[in-house]
Amino acid sequence: MSLTQLTLNEDLSAEFPRLQGATVEVGLADGRRISITQLDVATATESDVRYRFRLACGEVLGSERCDQIEAFVDDLDRSQDAGPLLSLCSKSSRSGRRRAAG
């Protein structure tokens, strides 16, 4: 079973190449769906995206945590649970790992 799906949005495609829009929708385990649409996104290579991420992340979480987040996202399509990403992105989590309740 694929965890990702790419679909064509006719309304956004009709505006291309004048605008380069995109919608991202995430389905949660509890059935909720979260989505966001940008009518015009800035063109960026993978290197550009990673560079911008590392700049923004590094200022807030430090380079070690950015490495962990980047590695987790790189393998996200093979993961059964995206939950650990929330912990990795939390400023309050020092190790980036979930702590056992108890």
Image (cartoon, helix red, strand yellow):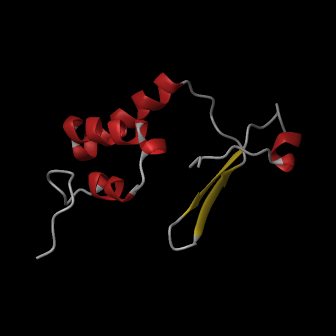
Q: Picture coordinates of residue 33 (x, y %)? A: 60, 67
Q: Is residue 92 above or below residue 38?
A: below
Nearer to me, 64 or 72 = 72
Q: Residue furthest front?
A: 1
Q: Residue at x 26, y 46 (%)?
A: 60
Using the image, determine if residue 70 lies above or below residue 5: above
Give the quarter of the figure containing the C terminus: bottom left
> Residue 51 in the image: x percent, y percent?
40, 28
Could you tell whether 8 is left or right of 63 in the image?
A: right
Indicate the quadrant where residue 31 lies.
Answer: bottom right
Q: Residue at the location (15% across, 67% down)?
A: 100
Q: Which quadrant would residue 62 be assigned to in this image? A: top left
Q: Residue at x 16, y 64 (%)?
A: 99
The single residue placed furthest to the left in the displayed view is: 102
| Front-most of residues 60 and 88 | 88
Q: Seen from this angle, which residue lies furthest bottom?
A: 102
- The residue lying toward the viewer, choosing from 81 and 16, is 81
Seen in the image, is 38 located left or right of residue 53?
Answer: right
Image label count:
0
**Picture layout, residue 92 above or below residue 1:** below
Against 24, residue 77 (above or below) is above
Q: Position of residue 52 (x, y in %)?
A: 42, 32
- Kindly indicate the quadrant of the structure image that contains residue 86: bottom left
| Image side of residue 63 versus residue 72, left or right | left
Residue at 59% of width from left, 46% of height from top?
2
